[in-house]
Each structure stands twice: as structure tokens, then as C-alpha cells.
Amino acid sequence: MAFDFQEYLGSFNTTDEATFVERFYTDDFALEGPFGRLEGRDKWLAILNDTHVGIKEELEALTVVREGDTIMAETVGTFTATADRPDFAHGALKAGESVSVRFFTIYRIRGDQIAEMTIAWWDAGMRPGRD
């Protein structure tokens, strides 16, 4: 089965992190970004779980380009607080507030799973409900 990016996004936007990570990431998954390098899908699951405590994230694709086993995507993630998160990585949020962040990610696919991601992000300049 080939990797389906739209299926991936749909699954990302659910709240079942464990099933999502097991389905879409290899055991030896590696992630590289501004924070350094992370290895192992269990560590990625821990980051997602921590990030989403009191936060609902919705990821939307803006541009997706694929060549062979490499996908490059510009996405926007909208993080909406379901509880106060003064320590949230993308800025303090009170329940009901949102922040949008733009992401540029390179996905390296092995079979039907992501083996490696390289990610960068920046403030999308949109803070619905805060202006």
C-alpha cells in the first residue's frame, strides 16, 4: 500500500495519538528540527502527547509536492486550547484561544510509513480570537 498524505492528515487530526503514530511512522523513525534530532517513534508519541495536553491541533495542507519517496509540504497547524496552557510551546493560551503556526516539512517515506521528517516552523501571524 502506498503512503497517502491525505489519509495521514485526516488521521493526524484525530485524538488517537498512539494508533496514528503506530500506523504512520516506522519503529526507527527520526525527526530533525530546530530542537535537534529525535530518534524512535515512542519519543515522537511522547512529544505529541505532551503537546496536545489541553490542546486540539488541526493540521491543514497548503502545498504538497511529492517525488518518489520524498514529500515536501507546507502546512498550517491551528492549536486551540481546551484548557489554559500558559506553558504552551507556541505561546501561552487560555481555554478557547487559538494560535496558528506554519510548518515546512520534508517527509521521507519507507513503504507506507514515514521513516524520517525534517521540520521547520514559524508564527503564521494569526491568533483568532485574540485580536
Image: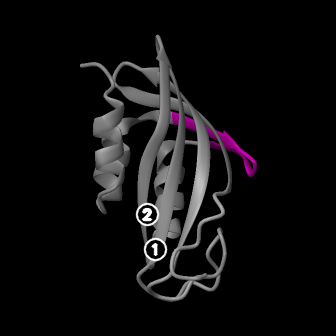
The amino acid type found where label 1 is placed reads Thr
- Picture residue at 36% right of the left edge, 50% below the top: 12
> Residue 13, image x and y in percent?
34, 55
Closer to the camera in the image, 114 or 89 = 89
In the image, residue 44 sits, relative to residue 5, either above or below, namely below
Mark 1 touching mark 2, by CB under 8 A?
yes
Left or right: 9 as drawn, with respect to 129: left
Q: Quadrant of residue 5?
A: top left
Pointer 1 local density, CA inside 10 Å: few below 14, some 14–19, many at least 20:
many
The crowding category of the residue bearing disc 2, from other C-alpha atoms within 10 Å (few below 14, some 14 to 19, many at least 20), is many
Q: Which quadrant of the rendered structure holds the N terminus? A: top left
In what element is the residue under mark 1?
A: strand
Q: Give the numbered dot on residue 22.
A: none
Q: Is residue 76 above or below residue 104?
A: below
The answer to whether residue 117 is left or right of residue 18 is right
- Work out whether 42 lies above or below 84: above
Q: Quadrant of the C terminus?
A: bottom right
The one of 62 and 26 positioned closer to us in this rendering? 62
Q: Please give the name of the residue rendered at 75% of the width and 48% of the height, measured from the top-left corner.
A: 34
Residue 118, x across and y down, in percent: 64, 35
User: Residue at (45%, 31%) from the top-left corner?
Assistant: 114
Q: Main secondary structure of the magenta part?
A: strand
CA–CA distance in space, label 1 to label 2: 6 Å
Residue 8 picture quarter: top left
Please give the residue where the numbered disc 1 appears in the rendered image.
80
Q: Which residues are magenta?
A: 29-38
Q: Which residue is mark 2?
A: 57
Amino acid type, callout 2: Glu
